[in-house]
Image (cartoon, rainbow, N blue to C red):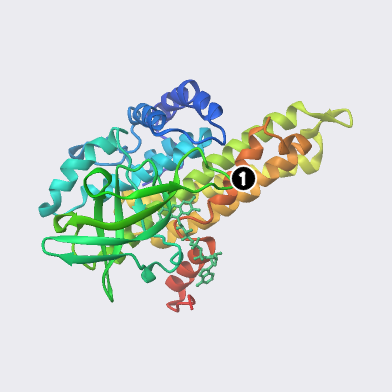
């Protein structure tokens, strides 16, 4: 159960991670502001971060994780995202995959044994391929096909918006194996082959969001995860965790823009006093801080339920839409507090505001989260 106040252990873990981030990661994030971080460089960073527990902090020790709580992992993750959302997003994808691999049934342990340790150590990058050019919110419409051919499947199709896509050494691909059957395959770039191309966006170009192309990609049937036709059910389990994590990364950037705003409002003088002494700016700071705290608590509630083994799709969806939309507003207010300076590349709030706009879209848009929450509450779906 999450007790609101962090424990001594949590405080110590956060403090030492924060020191590492300030000395080792912030300078790199600054150097690569708005520029793609090459794979080798990203690998150096993720290997360093892995020493502090991400991506495997909450994974049980028997699988190579640290056996910490999801709440503690969330605290560490907020610190990372407050320093670099590019790196945070890359680590978040690698954070979602270990639990996926660890939960595979015994006949698929060869996949766990082959891929888990490297991703936990930050040496390799995975990704999850659901979205396609014509398939966004409606996941059930997936068109990428996997056709059985003896003891293999042949995958054909195009995926898009795939986080870590260009970095990826392997991907979990959702493909159609029948009219009503979607299946997860683990596809290895070297062994089975696929092409990737980065997508240029308004922000977050330091990490990789990519198109992925599968052309007669031949994958052994033993690389199916769980069983044929089980992808949709398992995708919902992934979303439960992913959505609270996307909420947490929004808390990270909103907190960063709040900290910038507090510092600037004390330093910048207009009408003969710091702008923090003007009541409308003071109110903005108070509102921003309250919203950041509210979003953080919602994320921690979802993580705490996960720690207790309680399914929390609704709480996770609430945390996701609230925190991501909160970050859009808070990061926008931070630009306003900085006046004209806030629009320039000299100040981080410009970048943070662009990053915030991106985050309500992945892992189910704000609209989709609200539809899911209301369906759970009323029992009536309003999707179509
Ligand atoms: C940075 C980033 C990273 C991503 N990473 C991944 C990844 O790793 N793997 C992956 O598979 N995908 C990834 N995605 C894709 C993401 O999941 C989709 O963009 C998202 O699901 C929305 O799909 P879409 O962009 O096609 O929008 P659409 O589904 O076309 O939606 C367009 C608009 O219509 C609204 N809308 C759609 N249906 C309804 C409805 N029934 N009722 C009301 N409104 C509706 C949406 O909310 C949205 O506002 C990523 C996207 C981004 C931006």
Residue that appears at 19% across and 58% down: 224
The residue at the far front in this view is: 216
338 with respect to 24 (left or right): right
114 with respect to 23 (left or right): left
314 with respect to 154 (left or right): right
Q: Nearer the viewer, residue 8 or 174?
A: 174
Q: Nearer the viewer, residue 211 or 300?
A: 211
Residue 253 placement: quadrant? top right
Residue 189 placement: quadrant? top left
Can the viewer see residue 224 in this picture?
yes
Does 307 sit above or below residue 174? Answer: above
Q: Nearer the viewer, residue 345 or 82?
A: 345
Does 146 sit above or below residue 305? Answer: below
Question: Which residue bears the numbered disc 1?
Answer: 354
Residue that appears at 38% across and 71% down: 141
The residue at the far top in this view is: 23
Residue 165 in picture, x, y percent from top left = 39, 47
Does 310 sit above or below residue 269? Answer: below
Disc 1 within 8 angstroms of ligand 1 (CB): no
Residue that appears at 72% across and 37% down: 342
Label 1: few (<14), some or many (≥20) within 10 Å? some
Residue 46 in picture, x, y percent from top left = 37, 32
Residue 11 in picture, x, y percent from top left = 43, 29
Residue 10 placement: quadrant? top left
Residue that appears at 45% across and 72% down: 377
Q: Nearer the viewer, residue 310 or 149?
A: 149
174 with respect to 138 (left or right): left
Does 150 sit above or below residue 78? Answer: below
Q: Secondary structure at mark 1?
A: helix
Residue 162 in picture, x, y percent from top left = 41, 51
């Amino acid at each position: 159960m999450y007790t609101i106040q962090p424990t001594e252990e949590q405080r110590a873990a956060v403090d030492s991670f924060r020191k590492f981030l300030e000395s080792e990661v912030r300078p790199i994030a600054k150097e690569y502001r708005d520029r793609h971080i090459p794979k080798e460089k990203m690998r150096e960073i993720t290997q360093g971060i892995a020493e502090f527990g991400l991506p495997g902090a909450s994974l049980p020790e028997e699988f190579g994780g640290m056996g910490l709580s999801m709440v503690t992992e969330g605290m560490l993750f907020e610190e990372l995202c407050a320093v670099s959302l590019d790196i945070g997003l890359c680590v978040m994808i690698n954070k979602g995959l270990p639990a996926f691999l660890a939960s595979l049934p015994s006949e698929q342990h060869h996949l766990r044994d082959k891929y888990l340790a490297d991703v936990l150590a930050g040496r390799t990058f995975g990704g999850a391929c659901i979205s396609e050019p014509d398939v966004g919110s409606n996941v059930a419409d997936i068109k990428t096909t996997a056709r059985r051919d003896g003891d293999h499947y042949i995958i054909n199709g195009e995926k898009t918006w795939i986080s870590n896509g260009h970095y990826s050494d392997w991907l979990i691909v959702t493909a159609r194996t029948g009219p009503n059957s979607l299946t997860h395959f683990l596809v290895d770039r070297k062994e089975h082959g696929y092409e990737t191309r980065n997508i240029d966006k308004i922000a977050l170009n330091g990490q990789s969001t990519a198109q992925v192309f599968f052309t007669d990609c031949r994958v052994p049937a033993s690389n199916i995860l769980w069983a044929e036709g089980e992808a949709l059910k398992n995708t919902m389990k992934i979303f439960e965790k992913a959505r609270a994590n996307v909420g947490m990364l929004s808390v990270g950037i909103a907190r960063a823009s709040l900290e910038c705003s507090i510092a600037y409002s004390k330093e910048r003088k207009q009408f003969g006093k710091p702008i923090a002494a003007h009541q409308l700016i003071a109110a903005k700071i108070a509102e921003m801080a309250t919203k950041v705290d509210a979003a953080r608590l919602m994320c921690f509630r979802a993580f705490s339920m996960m720690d207790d083994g309680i399914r929390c799709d609704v709480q996770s969806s609430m945390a996701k839409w609230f925190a991501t939309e909160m970050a859009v507003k808070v990061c926008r207010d931070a630009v306003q507090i900085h006046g004209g300076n806030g629009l320039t590349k000299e100040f981080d709030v410009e970048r943070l505001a662009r990053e915030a706009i991106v985050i309500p879209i992945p892992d189910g848009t704000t609209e989709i989260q609200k539809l899911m929450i209301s369906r759970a509450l009323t029992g009536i779906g309003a999707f179509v």
